[in-house]
Image (cartoon, rainbow, N blue to C red):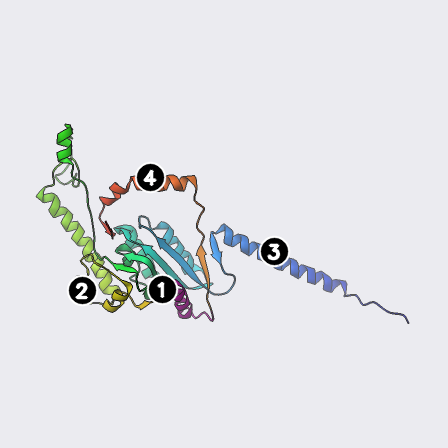
Amino acid sequence: MDQTRLTPPKNNLKWLWWGLGSFLVLTIVFKLGAWSSGLTTDGVGKKVGIVHINGPIVNADATVKQLEKFRSRNDVSAIVVRIDSPGGLVSPTQEIYEKIKSIKGEKPIVASMGVVAASGGYYVALESDTIMANPGTIVGSIGVVMNYPVMTELLDKVGIEFETVKSGDLKDVGSYSRAVTTADRAHLNEMVTDMYDQFVGAVSAGRSMARADVVSLADGRVYTGLKSKALGLIDTIGTFEDAIALAGSMGKIKGKPKTVQVNKKRPSLLDWFSGNLGQAMGSWVDMIPAYRWRME
């Protein structure tokens, strides 16, 4: 008996191979796009964007760019800002705070606090929809600090004198080469008090607390996550994973939310040099008023 072997029409095979090829190309393009943009993503679908704030806050540019990137992406439904920072310089701290404030209302933002979110590390979280910390997270240190060395006695002993030409009495305020005057102290106290008032105002607005209640807590003390919740400084206790789950729920993502975040660069020789340069400049940074918690 003759047997006829059935073969698929050539047109069907052509479309099959074309479909498989297109899928492969799209997959490669997607992966390359994520790699070239420095992003790690769980795949397609609605996601939670993760922004990390680690270490001292001395520059806001990278964090602000990440927040704006996730604000504009249609596949990001909510954002988690993961904070592990003792704070930092006033202006960069306020820039991050203002960026989060501008996004609030467009997309849900959850602040997740790790080991420490003190001073500026706490400030940046204040306009999040929800602030979450671990029970033992170090929170608070609401205040401003500034210190600078006065080395007049040392300079006298070694016989070094400085001649300073200035346009006004306060132009060299904070100089280590001359004694601190009453006018110096009054000027610096006025500046620090102004920055402190801005911090207290941000806490009062962000946490819906009376200013007097904030002031009673804002003497530089730090609190545990549990104590912070009782005092109204944070909203809830939870882990980083809890924060992602909450953000996913607030962003109306069904099931376990996928995430997307900026990849960390491999440390380079330039990073190593910059790190050592930063340490060498530590004393200079100390001279600038800062929302910073110091354990020393």
Residue 204: which quarter of the image? bottom left
For the N terminus, which image quadrant? bottom right
> Which numbered disc flags the more N-terminal residue, 2 or 3?
3
Report the Cα–Cα distance between label 4 and label 2: 40 Å
Residue plotted at (48% across, 56% down): 40
Is residue 67 among what the camera can see? no
* Residue on which disc 1 sits: 110
> Which numbered disc flags the more N-terminal residue, 3 or 4?
3
Report the Cα–Cα distance between label 1 and label 3: 36 Å
Q: Residue 2 at x, y = what percent?
A: 90, 70
* Residue on which disc 3 sits: 25
Q: Are marks 3 and 4 in contact (CB under 8 Å)?
A: no
Q: Which mark is residue 93?
A: none
Q: Residue 148 at x, y = what percent?
A: 19, 42
* Residue on which disc 4 sits: 277
Left/right of residue 17 with respect to residue 167 in the rendered view: right
